[in-house]
Image: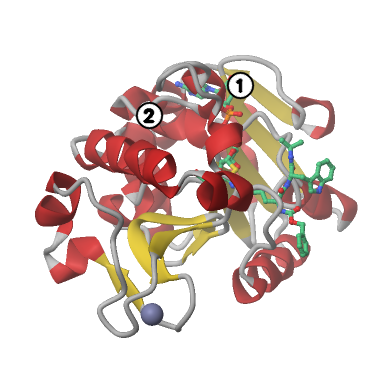
Amino acid sequence: MIEEAAKLLARSRFAIAFTGAGISAESGVPTFRGFNGLWKKHRPEELATPEAFRKDPYLVWEFYRWRMDLIRKARPNRAHYALAELESMGILKAVITQNVDDLHREAGTGNLIELHGNIFRVKCTSCGYGEYLKESGKLEEFLAQRNLPQCPDCGSLLRPDVVWFGEPLPRSALNEAFRLAERADVVLVIGTSGVVYPAAYIPQIVKETGGRVIEINTEESGITPIADVFLRCPAGEAMEKLMT
Ligand SMILES: CC(C)NC(=O)[C@H](Cc1c[nH]c2ccccc12)NC(=O)[C@H](CCCC/N=C(/NCCC(=O)O)S[C@H]1O[C@H](COP(=O)(O)OP(=O)(O)OC[C@H]2O[C@@H](n3cnc4c(N)ncnc43)[C@H](O)[C@@H]2O)[C@@H](O)[C@H]1O)NC(=O)OCc1ccccc1
Ligand SMILES: [Zn+2]
C-alpha cells in the first residue's frame, strides 16, 4: 500500500493535503474524539459554540486558555514536517487543515488554509480588531490572566478567532479550499474522522472531479469509503515511510 501511495504522489500533477486532529496526536494534542470529558467532563462541541460563549464566557475562555496552554507546549511531529518538505519539493501545493493548533505553520508549511481558524488569534466581538498573540508576544501574559479579555480599541469582549459549531467558515478560506480540491489530482487525507461539514466535502470534491484519495488514519473514518489507498497507521510513521 505504501508503494502505491508513494507512486500516486510522485506521479501527481497537483497534490494537496487535508488534515484533522489525528495528525497532531503524536505531538501530544488530544483529538476531538479523544477529548470527550477530558476537560471538566465537557464535550468540546458543547463549549465551541456561540451559545456557550453567550451563556458563560468565563467558562469558554477558561476552556480555550487551557487548550492554548496545552498546545503552545506541543511541537510539530514527523508528519507535519513531511508535509512541509513535500511542499518544498514542489509535490504538495497546499495543506488544508481543520486544526487550530498552528503546528503546520510551525513546521514550515507555506500555503496553509486554516478552515476553522487559529487558537492563538483573538478577535473583537464587535469591531474588526484582531491579534495573533504569538506574534504580538502577549501570549504568556494573556494565559496568566483569568479575566474576560477586552478589545483595546472599543472595550468589547474578545473571543478566540476560531469557527464555532453553527457558525459559517471564513468565506475566502472555504472558497480557496474548494478551488484547490477541484484542481487537485491527489489528496492526502491525514487523521480526520471526516464528520464535520463543510470541511469533510474537500476529499469528496477531489474524488468527484476525477482525483485520487490517499487516507492515513489509525482506524477507518467517514472518508475511508472513498479512499483509493487506505494506510491504517499513525501519521508520523506513515509519512516517514512515504518519504523514504
Ligand atoms: C459534528 C458535525 C456533525 N457537525 C457539523 O458538521 C456542523 C453542522 C453541520 C453543518 N453542515 C452539516 C451537514 C451535515 C451534518 C452536520 C452539518 N458544522 C458546523 O457547525 C460548521 C462549523 C464546523 C466547525 C466547528 N469548529 C471546529 N473547530 C474549531 C473550534 C475549536 O477547535 O475549538 S470543528 C473541530 O472538530 C473537528 C474534529 O474532527 P477531526 O479533526 O477529524 O478530529 P476527531 O477527533 O473527530 O478525529 C480524529 C481522527 O484522527 C484519527 N487518529 C488519531 N490518532 C491518529 C494518529 N496518530 N495518526 C493518524 N490518525 C489518527 C482518529 O482515528 C480519528 O479518525 C475538526 O473539524 C475540528 O476543527 N458550521 C456550519 O455549518 O455553519 C452553517 C452556517 C452557514 C451559514 C450561516 C450560518 C451557519
Ligand atoms: Zn473592538
| Whether residue 136 is situated above or below residue 97 in the rendered picture | below
Q: Position of residue 120 (x, y in %)?
A: 31, 56
Q: Nearer the viewer, residue 219 or 31?
A: 31
Residue 33 sits in which quadrant? top right
Q: Position of residue 151 (x, y in %)?
A: 31, 74
Mark 2, secondary structure of its residue = helix
Q: Quadrant of ligand 1?
A: top right
Does label 2 point to a residue whose CB lies under 8 Å from ligand 1? no
Q: Tell me the residue at 69%/62% (across/down).
A: 168
Q: Tell me the residue at 38%/37% (across/down).
A: 63
Residue found at the far right of this picture: 208
Packing grade of label 1 (10 A; few <14, some 14-19, many >=20) is many
Q: Tell me the residue at 37%/44% (across/down).
A: 58
| Whether residue 111 is situated above or below residue 43 in the rendered picture | below
- Say which quadrant the N terminus sits in: top right
Q: Which residue is mark 2?
A: 240
Residue 148 sits in which quadrant? bottom left
- Say which quadrant the C terminus sits in: top left
Residue 231 image label:
1
Mark 1, secondary structure of its residue = strand
Residue found at the far front of this picture: 55
Q: Does residue 71 appear in this view?
A: yes
Earlier in the chain: of badge 1 and badge 2, it is 1
Q: Position of residue 94 (x, y in %)?
A: 52, 61
Residue 76 relative to residue 182: left or right: left
Residue 147 relative to residue 39: left or right: left
In the rendered structure, which amino acid carries the disc numbered 2? Glu
Packing grade of label 2 (10 A; few <14, some 14-19, many >=20) is few
Q: Are marks 1 and 2 in contact (CB under 8 Å)?
A: no
